Amino acid sequence: MDLVSPNVATAGPVHSDGVIAAGAYVEGRRVANIAIDEAAGWRNKPDHVVWIGLHEPDMTLLKSLQRQFQLHDLAIEDADHAHQRPKIEQYGDALFIVARTAQLEGENISFGETHLFVGEGYIVSVRHGASTSYAPVRERCESCPRALARGEDYILYAILDFIVDNYSPVLETIQDEVERMEAEVLASAMTRAQIERLYLLRRDLLRLRNAVGPLVEVCRRLERDDLPMVRVTMRPLFRDVTDHVRTIQERIDSLREVLAFAFEASLLVGQAQETAISKKLASWLAIVAVPTAVAGIYGMNFKYIPELQWEYSYFVVMGLMLAACVALFWRFRRSGWL
């Protein structure tokens, strides 16, 4: 819930189903908390800006907003149905923007959406799914009335910048896990559980990249196109958001490459271990083969084997077998097989 100054007048209830905050601002200062059905009246007052925050509203509430701000049917339909691709649409003099949000829930990334309606004298944010509350954005903006007095496009910038900033904690947590996994891979081959976790991380990073990537185009249009409600003086701020999104994109790509290399390194480590084991087995088999062959020869059921009649044959044969085994052991040890 947003903090309201005790000097601010109240006009109607602040909360109803799906309504997080609804306020009217003049020169960057909140002058009233408003009801949804009063939004049009406040918006039409000179130099007033209405800022409304909703969380998973129903169609009744969205229809009420549509009547207040003459929102386009397609935009309302998109806002009612989540799972939209990040985009920016222009309907007359109003903008409709979709951005994807991300949060870590346990070990997995959960995704949500924010839909933004921006027009003359108003901005409405609609949150769906996993998303951090935008109360800190409102509080930060209200703490600097001079910046908030810039209008709707500044609020739009503040929300988009907040969304992009919230990608960083997700990536930092994943990066820590990736670094630990990379160190474990170099020490030994990966277990099945580690391989499954690696796959899930790569999948989540791909989904995050698909959520972040289209925001580059959204911010680029806000930065360069002559869109209504976006003043030329605000373009450098949207350019900063664009750069931030690209940085996030590069970090995601880097982490996905590290995970790919970790998997390849794990395969190589596993193959190297298998090769080392195979060499050791082959070496010991070769050593054991010498006494086995000699024993096999002298264990044949022939009546006339000359050496069997010699008094010292046992000691000579045993000595030769031992010498041959020692020689093979030394040779394999020198070659690194044992």
Image: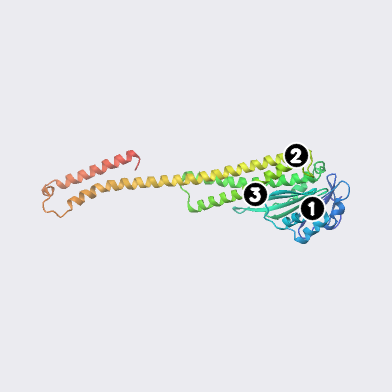
Residue identified by numbered label 3 = 211
Task: State the residue in front, 149 or 98.
Answer: 98
Residue identified by numbered label 2 = 235
Residue identified by numbered label 1 = 52
- Residue at (80%, 56%) from the top-left corner? 66
Q: Distance between the residues labelled 3 and 1?
A: 24 Å
Q: How far apart are marks 2 and 1 (CA)?
A: 23 Å
- Residue at (14%, 46%) from the top-left corner? 313
Local secondary structure at mark 2? helix
Residue 35 on image: x %, y %: 83, 57
Total labels drawn? 3
Task: State the residue in front, 43 or 141.
Answer: 43
> Where, by quadrant of the figure, is residue 67 drawn?
bottom right
Residue 234 on image: x %, y %: 77, 40
Of the numbered discs 2 and 1, the one sitting upstream in the chain is: 1
**Colour mapping used in the image:** rainbow
Local secondary structure at mark 1? strand
